Image (cartoon, grey):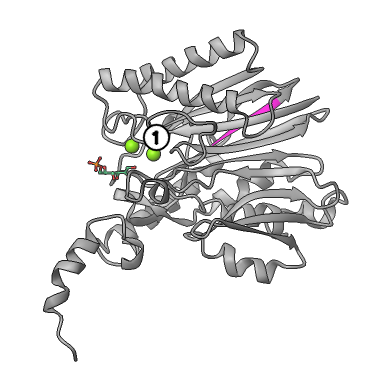
Amino acid sequence: MEVTLSVIKADVGGYVGHSSSHPDVLQKARECMERAKKQGLLIDYYVTACGDDAQLIMTHQKGEDDEQIHKLAWDTFVECTKVAKKLKLHGAGQDLLADAFSGNVRGMGPGVAEMQFEERKAETVVIFMADKTASGAWNLPLYKIFADPFNTIGLVIASNMHSGFIFEVEDVLEAKKIKFNAPEEIYDMLVFLGSPSRYAITKVFHKESGEIAASCSTQRLALIAGRYVGKDDPVCIVRSQSKFPAVGEMLEPFASPNIVQGWMRGSHHGPLMPVSFHDARATRFDGPPRVIAAGFQLAKGKLIGANDLFDDPAFDEARHQANLIADFLRRMGPFEPHRLPLEQMEYSNTPEVVKRLAPRFQSV
Ligand code: F6R
Ligand code: MG
Ligand code: MG
């Protein structure tokens, strides 16, 4: 059976500040999803939040970029915004950048990750959702999951993934994409993946079968809006087990937190902390950036789950290390590399200051 898994997310209001989502907003989203399920548009859905981002996880048979599904997500966020406005939540409707829906939510603010596939005998999927970070945050973990044998032993000893994976990478500034074969082209590929502020993995494919393995949201809010309106807070769907990396191989990169962009005012680097659903709240210095992992088995498109995969003491040490990294970076205050490089602060007020003071600079 062919199934499409769509994850569409938006920040439609924070509670309190930009730290988390209000239960009434999520309840409204569930009502809209339930209606669509009863009408037969959706097979199933799961609504959750990561920080101040509402997450709509939907299964259906309409394929990717379907107008009805995207309209459902848009209309749901509009309904949620009404609730957020009534409660005067902070930044109500902040990610809805268009006045009206027109065909596809891509380019309208919400983040989208979708994939269509033939459901296997046992279809394991993991959905990663992050807050206070930019699209591109998945580059390092996805590289480890699908190309690093020190992370994924299956690449070495499982014959069904021994030939490797294909990575599709997008240049988010120039809206171009390229495919790389791993492991053959990893040195070329890392030139780009290592620069996640510009290049982001969009999809990963199993090389031998051509089947979809991972799909990420790469929408850049600042590029769409032309100014800073909030961080992208990307999502990523990954298929797991058999010819794809095991659940444990998927989660392993998060055991040693990497440093991502997006903390406080979208202008700082911070550690990406793997947390349980309950702890997906951006409190300290509006962060630090968080990631949750929702595991599901699919049964004829029904979402069996979610299993809260980082709700596990095995990730306590990662959280501890993330806190140490956070302390260390915070000591630097407004200095790089805690703060983003000046040329990447174009959506803050720094260009105004630079422009105002330009006449006072004298040649040396
Ligand atoms: C939002 C974020 C926050 C805000 C900060 C200021 O995703 O990361 O750090 O940038 O709280 O928010 P405003 O400008 O809404 O007062
Ligand atoms: Mg917000
Ligand atoms: Mg957010």
Residue 256 is situated, as x and y percent measured from the top left of the image, at 53, 54
Q: In this rendering, is residue 284 above or below 343?
A: above
Q: Is residue 295 magenta?
A: yes
Residue visible at 79% across and 43% down in the picture: 211
Badge 1: how crowded within 10 Å, few (<14), some, or many (20+)? few
Residue at the bottom extreme, as displayed: 364
Residue 344 is situated, as x and y percent measured from the top left of the image, at 36, 62
Which corner quadrant of the image does residue 359 belong to?
Answer: bottom left
Range covered by the magenta-colored residues: 293-297
Residue visible at 27% across and 64% down in the picture: 332
Q: Quadrant of the C terminus?
A: bottom left
Q: In this rendering, is residue 184 above or below 265?
A: below
Which corner quadrant of the image does residue 89 belong to?
Answer: top left
**Quadrant field for ligand 3:** top left
Q: Is residue 24 left or right of residue 236?
A: left
Residue at the left extreme, as displayed: 360
Residue 154 is situated, as x and y percent measured from the top left of the image, at 78, 51
Q: Which residue is mark 1?
A: 98
Give the prevailing secondary structure in the magenta stretch.
strand
Q: In this rendering, is residue 191 above or below 100?
A: below
Of helix, strand and loop, which one carries label 1?
loop
